[in-house]
Image: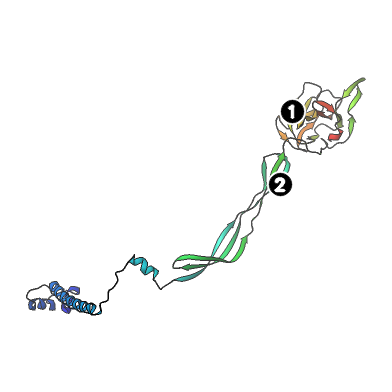
Amino acid sequence: ADAAVQEILYPQSNSPVQRLENRSGGLSSVQTLETGAASAESGEGGARQRAASGSRKEVPAPTGNGDADRTQQSLLQLDVTVIQQRALRVPYAVRYQDDARLPAGDSKVIQRGKAGRVVETLRLRYVNGKLEHTQVMARRTTTQSRPEIRLRGTNEAEASSTWQWPISSHVVTSGFGDRVLGGQHEFHPGIDLACSVGTPVYAANNGRVAEAGPNNGGYGIWVVLDHGGGLQSVYGHLSRVVVHVGQMVHKGQLIAYSGATGRVTGPHLHYEVRVDGRPVNPRPYM
């Protein structure tokens, strides 16, 4: 048998197996091995049968999934701890500032945000290849985040509780009410402020442009702002306007430049306030 195994593993010419074949009556090497193995197995099987018959013990048949049972009964457990680092992006915060110069619902970014960066040191525990526990051991900021700042519009085209003068000059050349102009008595529906041609004119309060451009009456080029609640302000005798009808404006916004258009005796700004279409003393609205 040993010689036959050698021949199978390392075949050579004129091997001992050939001589064994001659002595075995012409059987091939494989047949000779099979015959010997069968005889040995028969002898061992008889011995086992006699032993089992003498002891009268039964061996229970295996039940269940053999692979699963072997896995559950495994005595070897691989427990690995790993230390590693990871970089994380920290999103920036967004901060809002109310601004009456912007229409309600609008916003404007005045400072761009910048994301930060932190590096974490982690302890990871794996049991049999499965992550069981994660511990953050340290956290270090490498780049500080910067918030984004946005202006949030609150202007709903309605006047706030405070007003401002429409031009820098506070010199009143003609007041509100009855006056004599050119030898005739008349009602003056606003006040006249002394200024030279081209003086910037500003909105006295938040509002929406109702009129802008030439006027067929004595106002010349004018701007009318609607402040809501039946309240309007009028700016007359202008040289040029820089707003358009329907535009929302905020208090202090440039709307025109003063001039001497319409029925005038010289350059000045006519400022007028109307409540439900009726002129009122503009002093409380300055």
Q: Residue at x 60, y 64 (%)?
A: 139
Q: What residue type is labelled 1?
A: Ala
Q: In the picture, which quadrant includes the C terminus? A: top right
Q: In the picture, which quadrant includes the N terminus? A: bottom left
Which mark, by number, is residue 212?
Answer: 1
The reply to whether callout 2 and callout 1 are in contact (CB within 8 Å) is no
Image location (x, y in percent) of residue 212: 74, 28
Q: With respect to residue 177, does 205 lie above or below? A: below
Image location (x, y in percent) of residue 20: 11, 78
Q: With respect to residue 194, does 120 lie above or below? A: below
Q: With respect to residue 231, does 139 lie above or below? A: below
Q: How many marks?
A: 2
- How crowded pointer 2 is (Cα within 10 Å; few <14, some 14-19, many 20+) is rated as few
Q: Is residue 15 visible?
A: no
Q: What residue type is labelled 2?
A: Gln
- Is disc 1 placed on a helix, strand or loop? strand
Quarter residue 278 falls in: top right
- How crowded pointer 1 is (Cα within 10 Å; few <14, some 14-19, many 20+) is rated as many
Image location (x, y in percent) of residue 126: 48, 67
Q: Which residue is drawn at 73% across and 43% down?
A: 99
In this figure, which residue is indicated by the disc labeled 2?
A: 97
Image location (x, y in percent) of residue 242: 73, 32
Quarter residue 43 falls in: bottom left
Which mark, by number, is residue 117?
Answer: none
Residue nearest the observer in this picture, 70 or 79: 70
The label nearer to you, 2 versus 1, is 2
Question: Alpha-carbon distance for marks 2 and 1?
Answer: 31 Å
Residue nearest the observer in this picture, 169 or 19: 19
Quarter residue 3 falls in: bottom left
